[in-house]
Image (tube, helix red, strand yellow):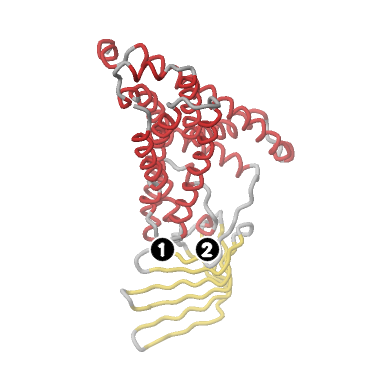
Amino acid sequence: MNAFLDRYLKIIDWYIIKKYLSTFVFTLLLIIVISVVFDVSEHMDNFLTKHATLGEIVFKYYAGFIPFFMNLLSPLINFLAVIYFTSKMANQTEIVPILSGKVSFNRFLRPYFVAATIIFVISFFANVYLIPFTNALKINFENTHGFYGDASKNEVHLQLDKQTYVYAQSYDNTSHTGYMFTLEKFDGDKLREKLIANTIVYDSVKRVWSFRNYSVRYVNGLKEKLTINLPQKDTVLDLRPSDFVVNNNYPAMSLSELNKNIDKEEIRGAGDLKDMQYEKYRRFVYPLSSFVLTLIGVSISSRKVRGGIGLPLGIGLFLCFAYVVVDKFAVVFALKSSLPPIIAVFVPNGLFGLLGLYLLRKAPK
């Protein structure tokens, strides 16, 4: 292993790798400390009024908050760190002797991509395995202490199985009561039974739904039977109160749970399929930004310019803002339009990857 490293990584490579990783880690920790300070000041009233203990705050809320934001901010912090220390090297005329010694720019990029690979591997395993677990700690803490109220859906259409469809005009999550409920059963494309209830109530102890003031219409070819103004009926349905509530738990699901919910959603059609697919694909694609942003960062900061490191940092901040904007637009197009989520997750890295290749051609050789 040592012979392999000695062959492909020289002293200058280790110098750049250490500069890269130390600047990245220091900047990331600094930003996280600042974020925690602001978050504590913002949620202090919630902690006090909800009677959260110090142990819960530290080992549940911030045990989820810190890894999530470290992973979220790491590509942008990585980008700014690359620009900062590379611009500093260029300003101190450290890069010119390297390139003048018959070292190609692609060879000069090797230590950058070695360090970017280390960050990619850590980010990838964090996205897939660690972050869902820590997110679950944070979300459970917020739900337990009532940080955010549950947002109920309106006009909910669901397919329970191949023959059964349900609809609810509105739902009150506090009382577990749905209003203007309809249940339809089909045989192929023919309607066989239609139940309409003014209200349905979920009994969390018995785990049954109660139809209140309901009517049923049975259809058998040209024959129909209508029964109206029935008082109450209890029944078991493959339906839960959580199906009527806006779900914020996708980031807290493990990959296996996410896949199971995607398979279930493809049948039921509650409108959350794209959200779950985007969350799944993003976990695999988002870490690739470490390579894309590293390429851009080195390309724009390896040239010595007047004014020192100020101009490259300014360009870097602008590109960070542009990356965030493109990422948010991709999310909106994925969830609100016909753009497939698997394509949407590649849009930011794809566009900025092309930009990186263009800047690489213009970089000093």
The quarter of the picture where residue 94 lies is top left
Query: Does residue 305 appear in the picture of this structure?
Result: yes
Mark 2 residue type = Trp
Sooner in the amino-acid sequence: mark 1 or mark 2: 1
Q: Which residue is mark 1?
A: 160
Q: Is residue 115 left or right of residue 25?
A: left
Q: Is residue 90 left or right of residue 191?
A: right
Which residue is located at x 62 percent, y 42 percent?
144
- Callout 1: SS: loop
Residue 46 vertical placement versus 217 (above, below): above
Q: Which residue is mark 2?
A: 209
For this rendering, which residue is in front, 165 or 79?
Answer: 79
Provide residue 171's location: percent of width, then percent of height. Answer: 58, 63
Residue 42 vertical placement versus 340 (above, below): above
The crowding category of the residue bearing disc 2, from other C-alpha atoms within 10 Å (few below 14, some 14 to 19, many at least 20), is many
Which residue is located at x 39 percent, y 48 percent?
347
| Residue contact at pointers 1 and 2, CB within 8 angstroms | no
Numbered mark located on residue 230 in the image: none
For this rendering, which residue is in front, 344 or 282?
Answer: 344
Q: Residue furthest bottom?
A: 222
